[in-house]
Amino acid sequence: MSNIYARITRDGLWNNNIVFAQILGMCPTMAVTSTATNGLGMGLATTAVMVTSNMLISSIRHAVSEEVRIPVYIVIIATLVTLVDVSINAWAHDLYKVLGLYIALIVANCAVLGRAEAFAAKNPILPSGMDGLMMGLGFTFALTTIGAVREILGAGTLFADAHLLLGSAFSFMELKLIPDYKGFLLMILPPGGFLAVGFLIAAKRVIDRRRASVTEPVQVAVPSVSCH
Amino acid sequence: MNLEQLRGKLFYQGALLGGVALLTTAALALADKATSADIADAQARDMQQSLTQVLPGKFDNDLLKDTLVLNGPNGEVTVYRARREGRVEAVVFKVSGNGYAGPIDCMMGIDRNGHVTGVRVIKHKETPGLGDKIEPAKGHWIYEFEGKSLGDPPAEKWAVKKDGGVFDQFAGATITPRGVVKAVKGGLEFFDKQRAQLLDEAAPLREAFGRAHEGDKP
């Protein structure tokens, strides 16, 4: 049993990482990763949606007919996203001013529907929740990394405005890495997102190949859902 | 009939979709009920904050409740009025200019003599790193307006330096400051035209807009 959870963890965080391996969810990825803080916030919000949507969908998987499953999943996911949206707006309004525009984008993140379809619809509740959690954390890791690369190169800072996301106790995370930095606009603008994602995916492939030459080859699962 | 057979039936699928839609809408309705008061509070706090920024100083009334809707330069505009001892000392309203990437919305405050008390950009989509110096967090440019009025500088000098005016532009971005300057000038002209009504002088009967607060003298 623990074997399953170990595999889910490895898949979610690294082997089958939503951004770096499945190349899904590019729309929110490009939109929010201009700073590491935004990436972190978007990742955590997506994780919350994925855990709950996976568990909900898994719990009703025997009752849902094959023919109408997609609209059922979409309605459930859209509802959860709206719940997250209004809760952040009401109880973390400063964060909402930063992320509000992007929360609705979680619906368009096909990775959420992808996990519902590929995992939650076929597995019991607990492993499904675990899958949502690990896929979400993998997504958070990817978004934060991309955001950090773009922020350091683009603005010379790291985790700027982190206190808006995590509270003032975390303002120590806000670093100014390069003093008197004039900024490198390209990395903040959309092309910088594509550049950062491209180089990071390449880096992951290199690491995987190195590891594969030491141990057994890594299986990269092909995503079953295609979208943008 | 067990679940296995039911799932293939059309009526079951319809009922399932309907049931799911009903449950999720119910959840959304509940969430709306639970959060709408907090959201309204937070938005009012935001508004209050931007009002205090463009209009420093203490006033007797709650600006959010002493409002007036007029036809402004960009359609209907809500004017917030600040009073001391019943007299309108200053007004705050929203103006909008055309930036490089869409409208730039600003809040601006004007005192009763027609001097700008402050301008803040509340919403814009200008290029990060170039046009966003209009935000106070990224530059001091927006403070240039404070104390200015329609006569100072003269009307033809209400422009960026590139157009022969007195306001700085940024390296690499002229359209953004040009849009803001034009919006602020438009706001001042609007104030000039509607002055009597804005300052509540034409109509001595004051509006009842919930102004019966403590500290309000009759």
Image (cartoon, coloured by chain):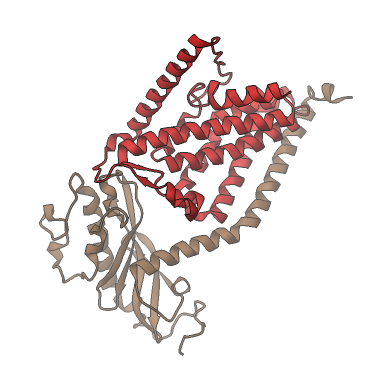
| Position above or below: B67 against A31 | below
Please name whichever residue, B138 or A211, is drawn nearer the observer in this view of the structure.
A211
Q: In the figure, the red chain has which letter?
A: A
Is residue B163 visible to us here?
yes
Residue at 28% over, 54% down? B134
Please name whichever residue, A183 or B49, is drawn nearer the observer in this view of the structure.
A183
Q: Position of residue A209 (x, y in %)?
A: 46, 13
Answer with the quarter of the image where residue A204 lies. top left
| Position above or below: A21 against B137 | above
Residue at 48% over, 73% down? B65
Query: In the image, is B42 to the left or to the right of B101?
Result: right
Q: Total number of numbered labels?
A: 0
Answer with the quarter of the image where residue A57 lies. top right
Query: In the image, is A135 to the left or to the right of A30?
Result: right
Which colour denotes chain B? brown
Q: Position of residue A218 (x, y in %)?
A: 54, 13
Q: Position of residue A220 (x, y in %)?
A: 54, 15
Please name whichever residue, B150 or A223, is drawn nearer the observer in this view of the structure.
A223
| Position above or below: B130 against B67 | above
Kindly give the residue lying farthest to the front in the view shown.
A214
Is residue B78 visible to us here?
no
Residue at 31% over, 44% down? B128
Answer with the quarter of the image where residue A45 lies. top right
Kindly give the residue lying farthest to the right in the view shown.
B1
| Position above or below: A83 against A68 | below
Kindly give the residue lying farthest to the bottom in the view shown.
B218
Query: In the image, is B6 to the left or to the right of A97?
Result: right
